[in-house]
Image: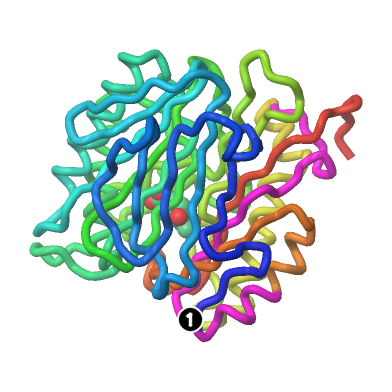
Amino acid sequence: MFHISDRMTDTTVASLLEGRDAAGAGVLANVRFGTYGAGPTLAGGAVELPIHMTHGRQHEFTETWSAAQAVTTGRYEELVYAHDDERLFCAGYIPASGGYARDAERAYSHIFELTDQLGFPDLFRMWNYLGSINDPNESGMETYRDFCVGRAEAFAFHGKDMPAATGAGSLGDGLSFYLLSGRMGSATHIENPHQVPAYRYPVRYGPKAPSFARATYLAQAGGNGESQRLFISGTASIIGHETQHVGDVEAQCYVALSNIDQLISAANLERHDVRIKRDDLRFDAVKVYVRRSTDIPLVASRCARYFDDRETSIAYLNVDICRSDLLVEIEAIASVRAQQGYTVE
Ligand SMILES: C=C(O[C@@H]1C=C(C(=O)O)C=C[C@H]1O)C(=O)O
């Protein structure tokens, strides 16, 4: 069985970033979570990226990234992009081959060249969806670890800060990726004191650690309080660097949600110089990755309890996860309500 919460109807358009009605605003990109994957294209002045993430058409949905100003689109190497005055959306697709390290390194180097050239040097969120993520490549290395090698080399070479991210399985072949980048100084990256930063994981999880932060806070240049966003990375049942509760999806779900709780606590945000009260955060969009389809009802009931805000859309995706002992992973985008004074509780 596959489930999408009843707040997400067929082909739901979740309008993100500006929170505007997608029909009335300019659009940077439409990411189609559906029954097939392909390289990104430019259509109607926006990026289109289909990713094979659902088992049936009835579960398809579209993530729409809105623009606040006029949109400029273009191509650079294997990348397709669209930007307004404040943000750049960029996407690509790498076909499956014997290994990903070289292609991922090249693609991420192109990303950094592009973001620097166009003046959007602050990467604030990236998604990487890999076919056969837990299977070995032609040299016997797990596909996810192989991808991490190339990505880490590009981040190190270009000296870039690591943003919030998701690295999960897809149902198709190849690597589909998309990311968002902002103007200099717009992003603050946040770690969770209960988790070793992913980029410091020991070598037993792969020769190069995963390049990402646990969350990224985006302060909108010239925006009001409501347009700030907190991007929470794919979060799983990991404490320190170790997977907790192998085989127990309910306990894994609990640890993942408590990790999110720790991450977004006012005290943790304050440590990173981000002053937001927990009550001022509203979850707009949540994606939950569940390895075994039979676990979705249980995971959905736990998530519905945690994300009890009626305005939150939650999508459940039955795909593999970066570590083969992880059964569930949760990512979220929260917006910040206008703030009336700030105190840490
Ligand atoms: C779940 C974890 O990592 C996953 C892999 C990521 C990546 O490689 O970009 C980012 C977040 C998660 O989707 C973790 O290590 O805690």
Q: Is residue 45 visible?
A: yes
Tag 1: amino acid: Ser
- Name the image quarter holding the C terminus: top right
Mark 1 highlights which residue? Answer: 293
Closest to the observer, 153 or 106: 106
Note whether 127 is above or below 300 in the view shown: above
Q: Is residue 200 visible?
A: no
Left or right, 336 with respect to 333, comes to right
Residue plotted at (69% across, 60% down): 258
Residue plotted at (31% across, 54% down): 203
Residue 292 is a magenta residue: yes
Residue 24 is situated, as x and y percent measured from the top left of the image, at 60, 34
Closest to the observer, 345 or 181: 181
Residue plotted at (42% across, 58% down): 33
Left or right, 44 with respect to 38, comes to right
| Secondary structure of the residue carrying numbered label 1 | helix
For the record, the magenta segment spans 274-301
Q: Quadrant of ligand 1?
A: bottom left
Closest to the observer, 193 or 30: 30
Residue 193 is a magenta residue: no
Q: Quadrant of residue 173?
A: bottom left
Left or right, 291 with respect to 138, comes to right
